[in-house]
C-alpha cells in the first residue's frame, strides 16, 4: 500500500462503497485508505471470506446471484474484480460462454438498480482481445445502456511500485446523471519502481520453499553478469529452467520483477514462479506474494500456503487501485 497524503486521506469520508467479488479485500484496503466506508461485501469463496473477516471483521455475503439488488445498501462506488478465469489466457478464455463470465451481468443489474455514481472494475488484460474485442465491446455497450460513461486502460503493477509484471484492465465508469465528463486520465508510471529483491523476506526458515531437483539448469554466465553489474530491471529476468522450462518451470532473478502471480497452474513453482535467491532456487512465500500485491505485513493470512497462493493470485493490486482512486478524486469528485 502507498502512504496516502493527508489532503487525500479523508477525501472519500462521506462516500460509501460496496465490494463485490471481494476476495481478500484489495479494493477494501484501497478505498478505506481515503476514508470511504464499506457498506456491503460479497464473495462465494469461504477461505477468502475467512481472511476478509480476520482483517476487516466483516463476513461477506455469499453468492451474488442470490442477492436481490434492492437488498444492497445505497452506495456511491461499486468495486469489483469480477471473476477472470473465463477471460484469462490461463483458462479457456470462454468469456460470456462460461458461467463465471456472466457474473458481470450481476454488476450491471446492481449498478442499474442502485444508481451507483462510480464503478471501479478490474479484470485480466486478455479480456480486451477476447473474440476479437467483442467481449469488451459488449461490456461497454451494457454499461452505456444503463447510463454510464466507460473509460478503461491496461495498467502494469510494475509501474506503480509493485515489483510484479501484472497487466490488468481497469474500468472507471461514471453515471451520466451524476457527472458528464469527456475523458478520464488513468495514472501513468506513478511510483519509483522496485525489484523483487526489495520485497523478499529476511528469514532463514525457507526450506519448504526451496526447489531441489536434478533437472535444474541455470544460465550461469547471465547470473554472473547480473551479479557484477547490479542493474535493476522493470521486467522478469529469466536465468534458468527446470525440466523443459514450461509453465511453473522457469527461473528468474531478483534483480528484475516477479512474473504474474497466478491462482492456478502447475509445475515445480506453480502460482509464484521460481527465483534464484542467495544461490538457491525457490518459490516465493505467501507473505512475499502478498507484498507483491500491495498488502501490508500486518495483513493476516491464517490459511495454508496453497490456499494463500490461490487467493492472492486472484486478488487485485492494492497500490494500483489507490492511484486510480486519487485520479477519480482529482478529476471527478473534487470538480463535481
Image (spheres, rainbow, N blue to C red):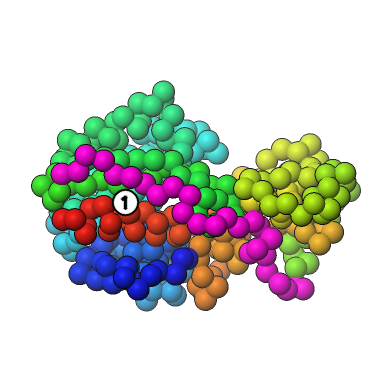
Mark 1 secondary-structure assignment: strand
Q: Is residue 324 above or below residue 50?
A: above
Q: Quadrant of the C terminus?
A: bottom left
The answer to whether any part of residue 246 appears in the image is yes
From the viewer's side, name the closer residue of 196 and 63. Answer: 196
- Residue 24 appears in which quarter of the rendering? bottom left
| Residue drawn 77% across the image and 59% down it | 277
| Residue drawn 26% across the image and 45% down it | 173
Q: Picture coordinates of residue 172 (x, y %)? A: 30, 47
**Residue highlighted by disc 1:** 120
Q: Is residue 70 left or right of residue 38?
A: left
| Residue drawn 19% across the image and 56% down it | 335
Q: Is residue 287 left or right of residue 184?
A: right
Magenta run includes residue 331: no
Name the residue at the left extreme: 177
Magenta run includes residue 198: yes
How many numbered discs, if any?
A: 1
The answer to whether any part of residue 104 appears in the image is no
Q: Picture coordinates of residue 278 (x, y %)? A: 81, 62
Q: Is residue 48 left or right of residue 7?
A: right
Q: Picture coordinates of residue 9 (x, y %)? A: 33, 71
| Residue drawn 43% across the image and 74% down it | 55
From the viewer's side, name the closer residue of 160 and 43. Answer: 160
Q: Which residues are magenta?
A: 180-205
Look at the magenta stretch and give its main secondary structure. Answer: loop
Amino acid at each position: 500500500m502507498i502512504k496516502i497524503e493527508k489532503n487525500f486521506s479523508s477525501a472519500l469520508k462521506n462516500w460509501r462503497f460496496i465490494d463485490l467479488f471481494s476476495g481478500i479485500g484489495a479494493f477494501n484496503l484501497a478505498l478505506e485508505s481515503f476514508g470511504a466506508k464499506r457498506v456491503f461485501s460479497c464473495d462465494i469463496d469461504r477461505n477468502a471470506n475467512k481472511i476478509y473477516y480476520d482483517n476487516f471483521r466483516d463476513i461477506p455475503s455469499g453468492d451474488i446471484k442470490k442477492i436481490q439488488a434492492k437488498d444492497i445498501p445505497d452506495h456511491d462506488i461499486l468495486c469489483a474484480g469480477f471473476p477472470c478465469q473465463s477471460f484469462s489466457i490461463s483458462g479457456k478464455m470462454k468469456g460470456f460462454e462460461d458461467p463465471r463470465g456472466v457474473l458481470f451481468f450481476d454488476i450491471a443489474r446492481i449498478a442499474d438498480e442502485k444508481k451507483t455514481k462510480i464503478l471501479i472494475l478490474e479484470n485480466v488484460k486478455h479480456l480486451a482481445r477476447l473474440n476479437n474485442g467483442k467481449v469488451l465491446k459488449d461490456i461497454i455497450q451494457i454499461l452505456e445502456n444503463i447510463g454510464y460513461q466507460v473509460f478503461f486502460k491496461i495498467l502494469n503493477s510494475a509501474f506503480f511500485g509493485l515489483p510484479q509484471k501484472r497487466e490488468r484492465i481497469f474500468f472507471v465508469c461514471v453515471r451520466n446523471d451524476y457527472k458528464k465528463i469527456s475523458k478520464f486520465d488513468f495514472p501513468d508510471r506513478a511510483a519509483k519502481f522496485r525489484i523483487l529483491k526489495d520485497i523478499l523476506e529476511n528469514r532463514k526458515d525457507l526450506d519448504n520453499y526451496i526447489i531441489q531437483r536434478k533437472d535444474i539448469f541455470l544460465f550461469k554466465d547471465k547470473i554472473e553478469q547480473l551479479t557484477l553489474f547490479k542493474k535493476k530491471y522493470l521486467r522478469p529476468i529469466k536465468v534458468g529452467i527446470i525440466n523443459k522450462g514450461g509453465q511453473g518451470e522457469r527461473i528468474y532473478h531478483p534483480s528484475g520483477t516477479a512474473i504474474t502471480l497466478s491462482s492456478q497452474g502447475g509445475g515445480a513453482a506453480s502460482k509464484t514462479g521460481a527465483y534464484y535467491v542467495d544461490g538457491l532456487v525457490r518459490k516465493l512465500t505467501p507473505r512475499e506474494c502478498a507484498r507483491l500485491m500491495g498488502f501490508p505485513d500486518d495483513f493476516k493470512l491464517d490459511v495454508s500456503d496453497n490456499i494463500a497462493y490461490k487467493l492472492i493470485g486472484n486478488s487485485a493490486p492494492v497500490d494500483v487501485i489507490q492511484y486510480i482512486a486519487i485520479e477519480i478524486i482529482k478529476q471527478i469528485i473534487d470538480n463535481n
